[in-house]
Image: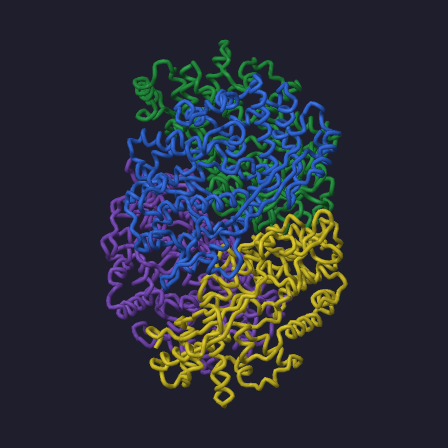
Chain colours: A blue, B green, C yellow, D purple
Amino acid sequence: MPARRAKIFNDPVYGFVSVPKGLLLDIIDHRYFQRLRRIRQTGLAHLVYPGALHTRFHHALGALHLMQLAIETLRSKQIEITDEEAEAVCAAILLHDIGHGPYSHALEHTIVDLHHEELSNRFMAAINTELGGQLDLAIAIFTNTYHKKFLYQLISGQLDMDRMDYLNRDSFFTGVSEGVIGYDRIIKMLSVHDGELVVEEKGIYSVEKFLMARRLMYWQVYLHKTSVVAEQMLTHTLKRARELAENGDVPDASPDLKWFLSQPKSAQDVNDPDVLSRFARLDDHDVSIALKFWMQSSDQTLRYLSTCLVDRKLFRLEWHQHPVPGEYKYEIEALVTQHAPQDIPLNYLIFTGSASNQAYNEAKEPIQILFKNGQVKTISQCSDVPLYTQLITKHFIIYPKIKTQF
Amino acid sequence: MPARRAKIFNDPVYGFVSVPKGLLLDIIDHRYFQRLRRIRQTGLAHLVYPGALHTRFHHALGALHLMQLAIETLRSKQIEITDEEAEAVCAAILLHDIGHGPYSHALEHTIVDLHHEELSNRFMAAINTELGGQLDLAIAIFTNTYHKKFLYQLISGQLDMDRMDYLNRDSFFTGVSEGVIGYDRIIKMLSVHDGELVVEEKGIYSVEKFLMARRLMYWQVYLHKTSVVAEQMLTHTLKRARELAENGDVPDASPDLKWFLSQPKSAQDVNDPDVLSRFARLDDHDVSIALKFWMQSSDQTLRYLSTCLVDRKLFRLEWHQHPVPGEYKYEIEALVTQHAPQDIPLNYLIFTGSASNQAYNEAKEPIQILFKNGQVKTISQCSDVPLYTQLITKHFIIYPKIKTQF
Amino acid sequence: MPARRAKIFNDPVYGFVSVPKGLLLDIIDHRYFQRLRRIRQTGLAHLVYPGALHTRFHHALGALHLMQLAIETLRSKQIEITDEEAEAVCAAILLHDIGHGPYSHALEHTIVDLHHEELSNRFMAAINTELGGQLDLAIAIFTNTYHKKFLYQLISGQLDMDRMDYLNRDSFFTGVSEGVIGYDRIIKMLSVHDGELVVEEKGIYSVEKFLMARRLMYWQVYLHKTSVVAEQMLTHTLKRARELAENGDVPDASPDLKWFLSQPKSAQDVNDPDVLSRFARLDDHDVSIALKFWMQSSDQTLRYLSTCLVDRKLFRLEWHQHPVPGEYKYEIEALVTQHAPQDIPLNYLIFTGSASNQAYNEAKEPIQILFKNGQVKTISQCSDVPLYTQLITKHFIIYPKIKTQF
Amino acid sequence: MPARRAKIFNDPVYGFVSVPKGLLLDIIDHRYFQRLRRIRQTGLAHLVYPGALHTRFHHALGALHLMQLAIETLRSKQIEITDEEAEAVCAAILLHDIGHGPYSHALEHTIVDLHHEELSNRFMAAINTELGGQLDLAIAIFTNTYHKKFLYQLISGQLDMDRMDYLNRDSFFTGVSEGVIGYDRIIKMLSVHDGELVVEEKGIYSVEKFLMARRLMYWQVYLHKTSVVAEQMLTHTLKRARELAENGDVPDASPDLKWFLSQPKSAQDVNDPDVLSRFARLDDHDVSIALKFWMQSSDQTLRYLSTCLVDRKLFRLEWHQHPVPGEYKYEIEALVTQHAPQDIPLNYLIFTGSASNQAYNEAKEPIQILFKNGQVKTISQCSDVPLYTQLITKHFIIYPKIKTQF
């Protein structure tokens, strides 16, 4: 991009993020983007890591910053990126998460029936219309229909700027120092070969470390026992609310959340501008305030679960290597039945399921290493250690702490 | 405190905070304390510094951590602190902000008519009752009725652990690196002389730096133009809501916020347990959701101000060295009148006032320096540079950005 | 240790290191310990990482700091460590590297024929004599003859404080952020089971990350191409000097280095106090100044190698997966012969050899994980990913850069 | 500069420093520049702050990095800087300290009689000749004879990149966190007005903080008691060595140091290429090894002072607000005479003198603040607090610790 006066955002992770005036700043000022200020990046993880309150807004700015560094690096290696392409790929990374709503996982499995990618596309289209088509190229890159594939890979790939920022940022705000990645080194090692993003040979160890950090952040943060418990509890709370709504007794909530609770899923048409507007008005506060409202609900189940969440009386989780055996679940049921209030159905007190993570799936898209002699190999062909290519699945059973929770 | 199994909290600022099981952990688990998870430390400053989302909960834990370091240091200098005193002073620092509600400044000047200190006292008393009197000593220290004055000074003094943590923490989360203080050095230099907290000679420069950082954080963060604008806009929004309520048209909000909006101030009796419970249920979410509700209000003023806040269309602020002259204000009024919607009264569009800060008020309570020869002087007597003892007052006028805001 | 007035050392890695007055400070003030100020921790790595100038002195202080944290943690878990034991294990960690000389690797393979462990023992014995036997317990722990084995493991084990500090410190000063380890988390998870050091279940990921970081630091720093080249060049320079000395032409150097260059190895008896004193006077400066002296040597080989090292004209290294084949070496020899000055023998211009690293050798000593139910497993039994247990060996050939180096 | 393949240096302070291949890398590879690897930035300060071992080499790289940021910022504000100017100003900042020798202060007052600026000029001229005149523009900027004055001010001014890096770097390696400066914020606020470097209004607090940090670093690090003591002891050691040399008994040392010790000052002609070469071969090692040699000197004074320095048995310093009164000095002399070895003259045991610092001298060159309305004021005209414009002078008397030092 040509040098241009910039607005500077403070970011404890990178110091500063400079945003040149013009298209990029217009995107940030848009109300659809501003709403990302009210949506946390890591959902309920702050119940384990009290510092993890950072938002998707800040993450998008951070990813923009890394994109600027990546463009600078690639250009210094004589990879051509025109000013238009640079602006477009920056716009695309800013918007990559625009389709996210609050607590995506919990809501999407319960009351929201809109596909995440479609939402992104619809939001981008809406903003593009308002901006008079300035996002055409950004959208082409984002949807991988532009001919320079590496631009798409910077947004969505094994080593994209999204991933690079969120690992870094989540690690920073949780305080899990083991998740720190050498993002600057990886970015400095990026290059393009045959139109695809590659990493120079010297970056092998940093890439290995990146995969390690990714796996670690999964089990230490995103799939931390308490994160999983809280998310499951929220999911079941919303399920209960929906159940009540379907029975004609819509629990109190903000107007927009109420709409999602009570409308049949068939009414949730992403192409309906009114639906899009409603979704765009939802944020973390709607869910938080609903939980507080529901602490007074006449339904004991809804009341119990909401109170547990608000006062942070969280259930216990046990990990199992295999699906939880029927007889064990039966034991737990017996125990819980004995102590729990009669009116709360067991399926709102005991949850089973599983969580999986695969830090690196080479089959899907390999990380390519470029050697000095021009040769290209996948990382697993040239790393002398086993990588985290295995899909790890853990099974859980979640239930109340008998002594303290009733 | 005797060594005891501890619960560990992650804190990106200090790495870890260890809380021994027992009284301190019981306090943290209490619902009154858990609510501090939903109250941000720096109110609306995140509109300028997007990382500043940290809560009073995390701050209280951080201050506890520093208190543990301070106790360790003082004991290593043969200052007697019994295990009971150590636990009590830790409990007191945990609870020092317990009386805070959401956006204290904005609410206290508009709809809440309860005194902050009284609230703290009532909350502590309530928790103490539930814990069977275990907080007696903590309360004595907190109210400065205990004979070891330095314990009180660690909680509330020029160099208390509250201040030490919040400067540090706010600096960390805003990314304003100039606010970083050498808290560990100051704490290592603490000692007690004639029953009062003093700083050893070697710590002079660090104390000077601390006063500098404090002043800097005030003008760069707490009294940053945008922070002041946002707070003033919120204050006037709440004022308007109250005005409407008093006219019998209570704007929609959560039940507890509604209560505060609509009850006469005389009904707000801190000794009434119901009032205390209501206040304890208020947090940032109640205010945020109210603003979203009010974006649909039939009152144009309320609607306008709320929308500006939610979509971050903030007014402009001008600092003046002297109170804004009448003629200048008149000019601004003429300008605004010309462009603003007719139905919005000017006093909801143009705000004047002032902000002050004095980094160090020696008259109120001096910082005492202990020399090797046993002599004690105040910092200003032994610093070879001017300190920030001056009260700085700046005057502001705030009004909409004409071009973009109507 | 009982609280006692302390001397505070600044450490950019941990902030401060407090050393209580008494035995520990006496050790630090001893001239044998002070000499560690003049011996770099990472030898010639500063030729790759210009910040890596930190010394064994600072490392020993850092390891002491971590030991203090470990003692505090273990005591908080009701593991008994008496004040005497605490002081002794602290003394032992301070002294763990006392036997090291300058550029250990390079010197030990060429001109110094003293065993490192024996040197440590002799130094400790000498200091112990001067301190009137105050180190008896420290020495017992250090030599693993004390009955509490976990104290020994804190000094020398898979997760000892030595390793923990050097990974951390080397990572800090090189700027290789991928080497950062969550030392505080691992230490907080340490416990003792059946008299042996174990890590609590929650620390599994951190231990995995630690092994990863260790492997990464090996290949990125300690066995970095340029580090290996510089060390090999220094080794061959010293070899040449010794060769000249054996032929009666002792190259100029400091008196003590000259002694080591010229004495037959049989004269190097670690039990001879004069030999110990001479060794104790050697530090990095003796080697650096010798290289500068040798830039003027009449021997072309010595002159050439020394000049290359001082002016940082380093040879090239190629890694091979298998021992470098004879015919390839022959090719290189032909090439070098063609360009190099006639008087320098080829074995001082072309070096072959290998470097190995095994991040974790479970067979030798396993890392034990303690589960909540009291069970103990080795880390590889409970980690769901492959660990770095493989011995990685790489072979090298090193030779001058033809174009620029003659 | 046009994008060009770069060599990357690791720097724990900034992460990475990229140096484009070509002139800048050629400068770095030059033996005169490489020698800066062997000259510490902060002399003997590592005796107080064990981490402060960083070199002038690393500092020059860091200053280059900041210069690159500054150029980027200024260009983004439409200040014209051609590619040639950019490269030249980068070359100039790399070379700004090229005239420094080891322990400049101590040597310059005793045995070296060459002017620092002249040395710089001579070194630059010599390198320029070797590089075929490529440094012409750099030298013009460096000597302030180029018409764009702001380029000179980036190298040598109140807010130059030299100062910015050394404060930052010294703060980093000493661990004195209070010295941290918001260098990135100040650089982002730089602009040019009427051909001179100015700071935009928003940067006022950061500049104030910068002056504060500068003052703090002076008294906490550069003029720290122990730093001053060590430097004074070194100065007097060298003085003694010179005295002996003048009496015909040249103490042993490296050939080049010996030359400086024994030649009459008249022989030290900076224009004599042999003198320049000799000076260029001096580094910290020559001094360190000389001290070790002198521990065996037959002169008791030289032996005593050298041993004290090597084994870190440092004298005591007392600060006085006024010049040390004659009678007090007399008292100290009597005390020392009583305990010190007879053969050491008192003027080698007791030193008096003074140290001064003025953080900001507006009279010499003001820091200019640019307001939005185009107005320019000096920082002291627009800061609402007193700045550190006062010249602070402290007087010292230094003498041995009687109990432990004889």
Residue D197 image position (x, y, % from top left) = 30, 47
Residue B328 image position (x, y, % from top left) = 33, 23
Residue D340 image position (x, y, % from top left) = 60, 71
Q: In the image, is residue D125 above or below residue A28?
A: below
Q: Residue furthest front?
A: A326
Left or right of residue A42: residue D5: left
- Residue placed most toward the observer, B63 or B324: B63
Q: Report how many numbered discs are placed on residues in the image.
A: 0
x 46%, y 58%: residue: A204
Q: Quadrant of residue B280?
A: top right
Q: In the image, is residue B96 above or below residue D162?
A: above
Q: In the image, is residue A196 above or below residue C54?
A: above
- Residue placed most toward the observer, A183 or A384: A384
Q: Quadrant of residue D112?
A: bottom left
Image quarter hosting the C terminus of chain B:
top left
Residue D377 visible, this orientation: no
Residue A390 visible, this orientation: yes
Q: Residue furthest left?
A: D147
Image quarter hosting the N terminus of chain B:
top right
Residue D46 image position (x, y, % from top left) = 52, 62
Q: Residue furthest bottom?
A: C248
x 24%, y 53%: residue: D82
Left or right of residue D67: residue B143: right
- Residue placed most toward the observer, D292 or C282: C282
Q: Quadrant of residue A24?
A: top left
Q: In the image, is residue C238 above or below residue C384?
A: below
- Residue placed most toward the observer, D5 or B171: D5
